[in-house]
Image (spheres, rainbow, N blue to C red):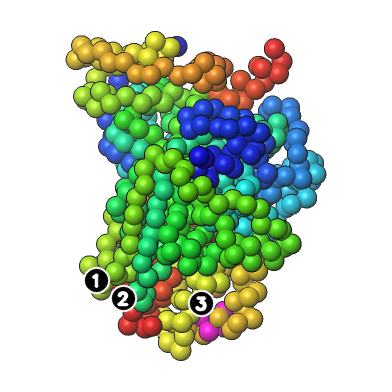
C-alpha cells in the first residue's frame, strides 16, 4: 500500500478542535465534515486534496472524535506523517482507513515537497529532495485494517470471509 | 511486580501481562454519550447486535437538551438503538455527564472501562482502568463485547506536600501538565501516589485523573483506599484489593509538589499554565463553572463560598455534573445562592465546554472556564480566548469581571 502526495507542513500539538470544531460533529456524513476541516486555522479544505500532512509532536491531541480523521480523509488527505500522534487519534485514523505514520526524519520535508509513503515496506521517499527514510512498519493486523479501508469494513470482511 | 494498570489488565486477561503486548479483554463497562450515534451507525453497517447490553452505559450529556432539529434527530436515533438492543443503563437528558454517572453508579476498583470519550479516564480515581476510544472501536466493542489493547507502560507520579489556601486539585493538575507537556504521558498509564493525592477526596482525585488526558495519558489511576470504599460503598460495592505492589516497575517515577499559587492555563494551550498573579486583572466576558473536570458538589461549594452574598460581574454559567450533584447542591442552598448572585444555572451536562450550546463564545470574547481544554475554537469562535482554572479562581473572576486571585475571598 503506497501513498503519494504533496506535503502540507504543520507544527506540534495540532488538536482535534482545530481539525474539526465541535459544532460540526453532529453528522456522520464525511463530505459535510470535509468542508470544515481546519476551519479555525483558516485553511481552505480544497487545498487538502492529495496532500500528505507532515507534522511535529502529538498530532491529533484532545477529543476522541473519530470525525477528525474522517474529515481529513474525506478532504483528500492521503496520509499523515508525524513525529508522534496522540493515542486516540492514531487508533481512530487507522480505524477509518487513514494511514498515520510516525517518522522523525519527515521533519525535513517542506511544504509542497512530493512524498511517497510505502506502508508495507516502512519507507518514505522525498522525491523533491531525494532523501529516503525508514519507519517501523505496522503489525499485520493494523495493515489489514488499513487495506480493508477501516475497522468496520475489516470486521464485515472477517465475518463474511 | 505489576503496576496498577498491569494488575487490572492481568486479572481481566487471566494471565500475566507485560507493557507493549497486545491483549484482548472483556471490559466491565462500555460507556457512550449522545455522540455515540456514530458507533451505533457503524454497528448497523456491521449488521451486528450488542453482545453484552447489560454492560453498556449510555448517558446523554454533550448537547442535551437538543439545540437543533438535527441534534434532536440524532438523539432520537440513539434512543431507538438503546431500546432495540435492550440497553437498560440509559440516562437521558439531565441525568448528568457520562463520566460522572459512571463514577456515581457503576465504576469499581479493578474494573476495565472503555468509553467513547477522551475523558473516560476520570473513573481511574476509583482504581479502575478506564480509557477512551473512538466510534469504530466502540462499535466493535458493542458487537463483540471485547476490545484489543496495548498494555501501557506506567509512570508513577508522587505528590507530597500540603496545598496552600486557594490551591485545589485543578491547580495541581495544571501545574503537573505545565511541567510534563501535553504529550508528557502519551500512551502511558499514570499512577498518582503520595500524601497530597491520598488526602484528596474522590471528586478531587477525579479532577486529577480527568486532566491526565491533557498530558496524553491512556489511563490514570489512584490506589483505592478507605475513601474509595466509602464512595463506592454508597452503592453496596465491596472494595477489592487493588493496591500497587511496592516494587512495581515503572517507565519513569516523578515527584511533584502542589503549586504555591492557584494556576491558570492561558489561551490556547492547557500546558501554558501560569500562577494566577501573572494573569490577574485580565478582563473576561464569561465564566463557566462545571464539566467532567470540575462540576461536582465540592466544586460548586468552593465557587459558592467565594460568590456568596455578592453579585457576579461577568456572565457566569454553572452546570452541575449530574442530577445528584444538582439535588445535593440545591438542598445545601448553593443553587439559590449562586442564582441570587446572578449566575445562570444550566442543566446537568457538559454545558459550553465543547462550544456547541449553552454559552458559545463570540469573536473577541474571553472566557474563564473550569473545564479541561482551551484549544482555539473549543467553546465557539476561533477568535475567542479561554483561560482555565479551579472553581474558586473562576468564582473570584466572576465576582470581579477579571481574572482574580481566589485567596482574597477565602
Residue B43, percent from left and from top: 68, 32
Q: What SS does tag 2 mark?
A: loop
Magenta-drawn stretch contains B298 = no
Foreground pick, A50 / B85: B85
- Which quarter shows the C terminus of chain B? bottom left
The span shown in magenta is B335-339
Residue B101: mark in rendering: none
Looking at the rendered structure, the number of numbered marks drawn on it comes to: 3
- Asked whether residue B338 is drawn in magenta, I would say yes
Q: Residue at x 32, y 24 (%)?
A: A103
Q: Residue at x 64, y 81 (%)?
A: B331
Residue that carries the numbered disc 1 in the rendered image: B277
Instruction: List x then y, in percent, for residue A131.
Output: 22, 13
Q: Is residue B62 visible?
A: no
User: Compared to B289, does B374 lie above or below?
Assistant: above
Secondary structure that dominates the magenta span: helix
Dot 3 surroundings within 10 Å: few (below 14), some, or many (20 or more)? some
Q: Determine if residue B133 is in view.
A: yes
Residue position marked by numbered label 3 in the rendering: B301
Going from the N terminus, do you reach mark 3 or mark 2 first? 3
Pointers 1 and 2 in contact (C-beta within 8 Å): yes
Of residues B336 and B359, the one drawn nearer to the viewer in this rendering: B336
Q: Which residue is mark 2?
A: B405
Q: Mark 3 or 1 closer to N-term?
A: 1
Is the residue under label 1 in contact with that under label 3 (CB below 8 Å)?
A: no
Q: For label 1, count other residues whose C-alpha is less than 10 Å away and answer few (under 14), some (14-19) or many (20+).
A: some
Query: Which chain does the numbered disc 1 sit on?
Result: B
The answer for how far apart the CA atoms under marks 3 and 2 are is: 17 Å
Q: Is residue A37 above or below residue B366?
A: above
Left or right side of B155 for B106: right
Real-space Cα separation, disc 1 to disc 2, in angstroms: 7 Å
Amino acid at each position: 500500500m503506497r501513498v503519494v502526495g504533496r506535503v502540507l507542513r504543520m507544527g506540534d500539538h495540532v488538536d482535534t478542535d482545530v481539525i474539526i470544531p465541535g459544532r460540526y460533529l453532529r453528522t456522520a456524513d464525511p463530505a459535510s465534515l470535509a468542508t470544515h476541516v481546519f476551519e479555525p486555522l483558516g485553511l481552505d479544505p480544497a487545498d487538502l486534496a492529495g496532500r500528505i500532512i507532515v507534522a511535529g509532536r502529538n498530532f491529533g491531541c484532545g477529543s476522541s472524535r473519530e470525525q477528525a480523521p474522517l474529515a481529513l480523509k474525506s478532504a483528500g488527505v492521503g496520509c499523515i506523517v508525524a513525529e508522534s500522534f496522540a493515542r486516540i487519534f492514531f487508533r481512530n485514523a487507522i480505524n477509518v482507513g487513514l494511514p498515520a505514520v510516525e517518522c522523525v526524519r519527515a521533519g525535513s520535508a517542506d511544504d509542497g515537497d512530493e512524498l511517497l509513503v510505502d506502508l508495507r515496506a516502512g519507507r518514505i521517499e522525498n522525491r523533491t529532495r531525494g532523501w529516503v527514510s525508514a519507519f517501523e512498519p505496522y503489525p499485520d493486523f493494523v495493515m489489514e485494517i488499513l487495506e480493508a479501508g477501516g475497522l468496520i469494513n475489516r470486521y464485515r470482511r472477517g465475518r463474511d470471509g | 511486580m505489576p503496576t496498577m494498570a498491569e494488575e487490572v489488565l492481568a486479572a481481566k486477561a487471566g494471565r500475566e501481562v507485560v507493557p507493549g503486548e497486545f491483549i484482548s479483554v472483556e471490559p466491565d463497562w462500555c460507556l457512550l454519550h449522545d455522540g455515540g450515534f456514530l458507533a451505533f451507525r457503524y454497528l448497523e453497517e456491521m449488521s451486528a447486535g450488542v453482545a453484552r447490553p447489560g454492560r453498556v452505559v449510555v448517558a446523554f450529556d454533550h448537547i442535551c437538551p437538543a439545540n437543533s432539529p438535527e441534534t434532536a434527530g440524532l438523539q432520537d436515533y440513539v434512543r431507538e438503538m438503546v431500546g432495540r438492543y435492550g440497553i437498560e443503563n440509559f440516562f437521558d437528558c439531565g441525568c448528568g455527564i457520562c463520566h460522572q454517572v459512571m463514577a456515581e453508579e457503576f465504576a469499581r476498583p479493578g474494573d476495565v472501562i472503555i468509553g467513547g470519550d477522551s475523558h473516560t479516564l476520570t473513573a481511574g480515581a476509583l482504581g479502575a482502568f478506564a480509557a477512551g476510544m473512538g466510534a469504530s472501536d466502540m462499535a466493535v466493542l458493542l458487537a463483540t463485547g471485547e476490545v484489543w489493547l496495548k498494555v501501557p507502560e506506567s509512570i508513577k507520579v508522587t505528590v507530597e506536600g500540603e496545598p496552600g489556601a486557594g490551591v485545589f486539585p485543578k491547580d495541581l493538575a495544571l501545574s503537573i501538565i505545565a511541567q510534563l507537556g501535553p504529550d508528557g504521558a502519551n500512551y502511558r498509564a499514570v499512577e498518582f501516589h503520595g500524601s497530597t493525592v491520598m488526602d484528596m477526596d474522590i471528586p478531587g482525585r477525579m479532577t486529577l485523573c480527568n486532566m491526565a488526558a491533557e498530558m496524553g495519558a491512556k489511563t490514570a489511576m489512584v490506589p483505592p483506599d478507605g475513601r474509595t470504599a466509602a464512595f463506592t460503598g454508597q452503592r453496596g460495592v465491596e472494595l477489592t484489593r487493588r493496591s500497587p505492589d511496592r516494587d512495581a516497575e515503572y517507565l519513569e517515577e516523578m515527584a511533584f509538589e502542589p503549586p504555591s499559587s492557584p494556576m491558570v492555563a492561558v489561551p490556547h494551550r492547557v500546558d501554558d499554565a501560569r500562577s494566577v498573579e501573572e494573569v490577574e486583572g485580565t478582563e473576561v466576558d464569561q465564566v463557566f463553572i462545571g464539566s467532567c473536570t470540575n462540576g461536582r458538589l465540592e466544586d460548586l461549594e468552593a465557587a459558592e463560598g467565594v460568590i456568596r452574598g455578592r453579585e457576579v460581574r461577568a456572565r457566569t454559567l454553572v452546570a452541575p455534573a449530574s442530577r445528584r450533584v444538582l439535588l445535593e447542591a440545591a438542598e445545601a442552598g448553593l443553587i439559590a445562592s449562586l442564582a441570587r448572585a446572578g449566575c445562570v444555572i444550566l442543566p446537568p451536562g457538559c454545558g459550553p465546554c465543547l462550544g456547541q450550546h449553552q454559552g458559545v463564545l463570540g469573536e473577541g470574547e474571553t472566557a474563564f472556564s473550569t473545564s479541561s481544554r482551551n484549544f482555539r475554537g473549543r467553546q465557539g469562535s476561533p477568535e475567542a480566548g479561554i483561560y482555565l482554572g479551579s472553581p474558586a479562581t473562576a468564582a473570584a473572576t466572576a465576582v470581579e469581571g477579571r481574572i482574580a486571585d481566589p485567596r482574597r475571598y477565602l
